[in-house]
Amino acid sequence: MRTATTSPATGTLLPPMSIPDVTVTVIVYNDAERLPRAVASVLRQTHANIEVVISDDHSTDATEEVARELAAHDPRIVYLRLPENSGGCSAPRNRALEIARAPYLMFLDSDDELPERAVEVLLAAHRERDLDFAMGAVHRVRVDGGRRTTWMPHLVAERRTLDGIEADPRLFFEHLSTSKMYARAFLDRHGLRFPEGIHYEDQLFSAQAYCLAKTFTVVPEPVYRWYIAPYAASDSASISNQRHKLTNVRDRVHVQRLIDAFLAESGHEGLREDKDFKFLKHDFRMYAGDLPYRDDTWLASFADLMNPYLVTLAEGAYARLPRAERVVLRLLRDRRLADVRTAARGLGHDVAPRRVTPDEESGRVYWGEGVPDSPEARRELDLTDLELDTRPFFTALLRHEITEVSRGPGASVDLSVRTYDPALRLPVGPQRAVLHLSPGRRRLTVPFRLSPVRPGLFEGRVRLDLAAARLPVHGFEGTRHPVLRLRHQGRTHTGILLAPLAFAPLTARVPYRTGLTPHRVTLRPEGHNPGRLQITWHPVGATAAILRPAARRLSTPRTRRAARLLANVLR
């Protein structure tokens, strides 16, 4: 008879021959480096009676060796290796489900972690009520800077128990399978497994779980730590970050059709509009921000894949979107591909179209040049309700585009700027403009003039001297996006600067404070989303080696308050 064992990670005494309370499946493929971190996060759990199944999708690197060594050092770890690579997440999870011994199940990817109380918190929710699953908050951590945010925070802000997804269909937006602890009996009762052979399996699995569950609990505590690498190389990026691949688009649309079929077959057709809205607002929106960077061939193929599905979506789902997103969708459906690029650059930043067209007969105002031909296009491209010509000037819709970037003397750059004013808010005549840039807490302002080309269009040139920026004494490391400000009738308008979508980065070593705080400064297009002009500072020399580490050590709430007080006195 086996005696009790002690967890090497926590020192906790484990009961002999016990059935674990929870099985956590860690799926892995060619990730030998990060697998130990993921497994360690499970072994550190405050609830120790767990089983860890490492499910290896036939890795070809050192993953097998690492996994077997982990299993040899803790009796709670089981290593499972698939006989061949499946190419996805579903098969490794399903094979682990076949051997999992616990009545409650969780899933973890090898590049992520579980917070220490994740198992404890979710298991407590199950033990309070007879639940089909419990779910909690997901913390997203950017690997390029450590910034931490909560995934869909409005959905997990408070503790609540729901009797079915109908109580809050917004939860379709939280489609991660990894943020949940499932009752094994619930999964087995419905034969619920991950669909194999397709990507975006979480979306179908989670939609089915939401619809089949009679009762589930949401807790606000963090139960998953999701590491995000937004700029990973395309060959190593996660599936959701491979949006440049048309196969990615095809997979996402295919999964949506499977979800739609399930809703119809399971008697949940009433949830279709909510699910369609989630697709438009989340899934399609992810692609929309990338559309300005796609060539004509790619855009045409994207429309071929997307438009047949867009036709099937509920009209009510479109009506719930912001107007700017509806415009992009309509232009895509009408295959106005050049206009799609123009419209997509404004998403999320209140950027105007280059032109609008008033219809004298109806009094309506439409996006772009010309009155749309079809009733559907007139409905979706109608901007009248935005009150472009009467809204307060600080909220006016203008569009500032940089048409040319060239290197100037020293660390300066010359920018040619074109401003579109489709609602004719600015008088025809020279406009005084100011370029604002704020590295750290200091602001650099560069005045220049915009001259009229025709009503609604202005152009100007401005020289931005990056050496003139006033950095903190200890230097500055980070990225800033210049903005353009205009004044009209005593009101100020601030707008982003859209850079050319592609130009060679300009880099200079700038000896701030006569060389005491040198920095490497790089100017480039943002490269994603609207494509703003982007400037990045990297301390070098003594600034990086001495001043910034010293500033971090000395930076406390008290010293920061004292520094602000002194700055106010000396101002």
Image: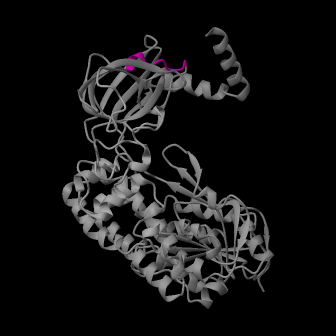
The residue at 32%/58% (across/down) is 378
Asked which quadrant contains residue 570, the reply is: top right
Measuring from the top left, give residue 330's x and y in whole percent: 32, 60
Measuring from the top left, give residue 23's x and y in whole percent: 65, 76
State whether residue 497 appears in this view. Answer: yes
Q: From which residue to which does the magenta span run?
A: 466-473
Measuring from the top left, give residue 310's x and y in whole percent: 35, 70
The residue at 32%/64% (across/down) is 376
Name the one closer to the observer, 533 or 537.
533
Q: Is 9 positioned to the left or the right of 252 in the image?
A: right
Q: Is 228 positioned to the left or the right of 197 in the image?
A: right
Asked which quadrant contains residue 468, the reply is: top left
Vertical position of residue 508 compared to residue 301: above or below: above
State whether residue 77 appears in this view. Answer: no
Colour scheme of this structure image?
one colour
Image quarter in which the N terminus is found: bottom right
Name the one closer to the observer, 455 or 86.
455
Image quarter in which the C terminus is found: top right
Vertical position of residue 570 compared to residue 175: above or below: above
The residue at 36%/30% (across/down) is 522
The residue at 66%/59% (across/down) is 115
